[in-house]
Image (cartoon, grey):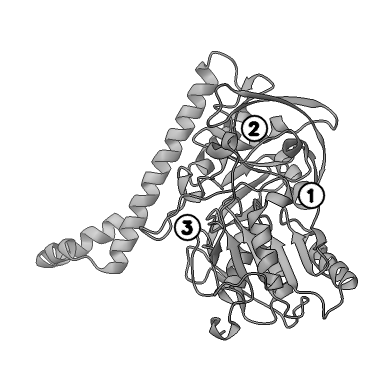
Amino acid sequence: MRNSSFVVLGAAAGAALTFFVAQPRPAMTEAIAKVSGETNTFRQLNLFGDVFERVRADYVDKPNDQKLVEDAISGMLTGLDPHSSYMNAKSFKDMQVETQGQFGGLGMEVIMEGGALKVVSPIDGTPAAKAGVLANDIISKIDSDAVQGLTLEQAVTKLRGPINSQVHLTIQRKGADKPVEVTLTREVIRVPSARWQVEGDDVGYIRLTEFTEQTAEGLEKGIAAIQAKVPEDKLKGYILDLRNNPGGLLDQAVSVADTFLGHGEIVATRGRKPDDMQRFDAKPGDLAHGKPLIVLVNGGSASASEIVAGALQDQKRATILGTQSFGKGSVQTIIPLGGDNGALRLTSARYYTPSGRSIQAKGITPDIEVMQDVPADLKSDADTGGEASLRGHLTGDPGKENKGSQSYVPPDPKNDKALHEADDLLRGVKSNPAFPPHPELARKN
C-alpha cells in the first residue's frame, strides 16, 4: 500500500512528482528510511539464520545449538564496547552473588582487551593479591588452556571453581623475560565493605576496595568506629582511599558520596534519548561533621570510584590526591532475560559529575598529583592504560582522552608517598593551595 500511495501521488501531478523526489516531505522521508532500514535489518537477520543453519549442518563436529546462540549474542555485545556482555544463567547467578560482597574465586578484576584477559587490579587480601598478580598482567593460559578465543564470561567461569581447588595461571608480564607461572587456591572471596584504622592518633583512614551492596554500610561503621576512638576536637580529618578500586554498584557510589555531602548533586546519568536522564542529589547530613577530607585515587580507580571522587571534588568537599584515574564514565544496566536465559550487561548511559564533566576515557584529574617510587622490576607494570586504551571504548571529549596513569601502591605503608602527603596535609605539617578546598566555589545546585 505504501508503494501504491506513492505512485498515485506522483500520477496525480507529474511536476509535483519531481519536486517530491528532490525535496521529500520529512515525515515521508522518515517513513521510507524506516522501511528501508527495517528491510536491511531483516536481510541481516536472514543472513544470521543462514549461517546458523550452515554451521549446524556442515561443521565437522555436531555443535551445541544453545552454545552457538550464546556465542553469537556474546559476540554482538562485546563488539559494542568493552563493558557490555552477555551472561548465561550461571554467570548471571555468579554476578548476583558477587555484588553481595561474597563469592568464590581468586579475587581480581579482569577485562577482555583485544582477545586478551587483562587484570585491572587484584583485590586486597585475596589469593590473587597474595600470589603477586599485578594490574596489567595478561593471563594467557588457565590450567594450560589458552585464553585467546574465549569471551570474558567464559574466562571468568574458568577462573572460578570449587573452594580449595587449585588453578594454574600463565601470565604475560611486561618487562619479564619469560611468562610468570602461578598456582592459586580458590577461596570464598569476602570483599570487605570497608577497612579502617586510625593513622597516628588523630587521622581517620578508610579504604574501600570495591562497591558492593555492603559498602556504604561498612563506610558508616568505619566512620563511627573512628569517631568513637578519637575525640572530636583531636580528629584532624579523614583519608578515603579509593586506589585500585575498580568500581561496582551505582547506588553504592551515590550513598558513599552522600555520606560526606549534605546537599547538592552527586552524579547525573544520560542515555541515548533526551528523557533518559537521572540526577542523584545528596540528602541533608554529613556523617564526618565537615571534617577535612582527602580522597586518594590512581590509575586503577574506576567507575563508581570516579563518581565519588568527581562529586566530592566538584562540590569542594574533598581534595583529590594521587594520579589520574582510569576514566570509565559509563553505566551498565543488568537486564534479566527471564527463565534460564541469563541477562545482558548493557552500557546504557554516560555519567556526568556535578559540574557537567564527562570523565569517559579521561578520568578524574587529582588536585594534587603525587607519584610513587616504583621498584625497578615493576616499572613496566606501574601504569594502567586507562579506558582510552581499551579497544572499542566509548569516545570521550575529542582531544582530551588520557591513557591511564600510575597504579602502583607500595605494599608497605612506610613507602606510600600519597598516604604520607595526605597525613601531612591534614596535620598541617605541609600546605598546598588545593587543601583545604573552598566550598564557596562549588557549583551551586
Front residue of 211/425: it is 425
- In which image quadrant can residue 195 be found? bottom right
294 shown above or below 443:
above
Q: Is residue 71 visible?
A: yes
SS for dot 1: loop
Task: Please give the label number shown on residue 191.
Answer: 1
Closer to the camera, 445 or 171? Answer: 171
CB within 8 Å, label 1 to label 3: no
Between tags 2 and 1, which lies in front?
A: 1
Decide: few, some or many residues near mark 1? Use Cα within 10 Å; few <14, some 14-19, many ≥20: many
- Residue picked out by circle 2: 155
Residue at mark 3 to residue at mark 2: CA–CA distance: 28 Å
The structure residue drawn at horizontal position 60% and vertical position 72%, both measured from the top left corner, is 431
User: Measured from the top left, where is residue 302 in percent x and y?
Assistant: 60, 54
The residue most toward the front is: 429
Number of labelled discs? 3
The amino acid beneath tag 2 is Ala
Residue 79 is left or right of residue 7, and the answer is right
x and y percentages locating residue 284 in the rendered image: 73, 83
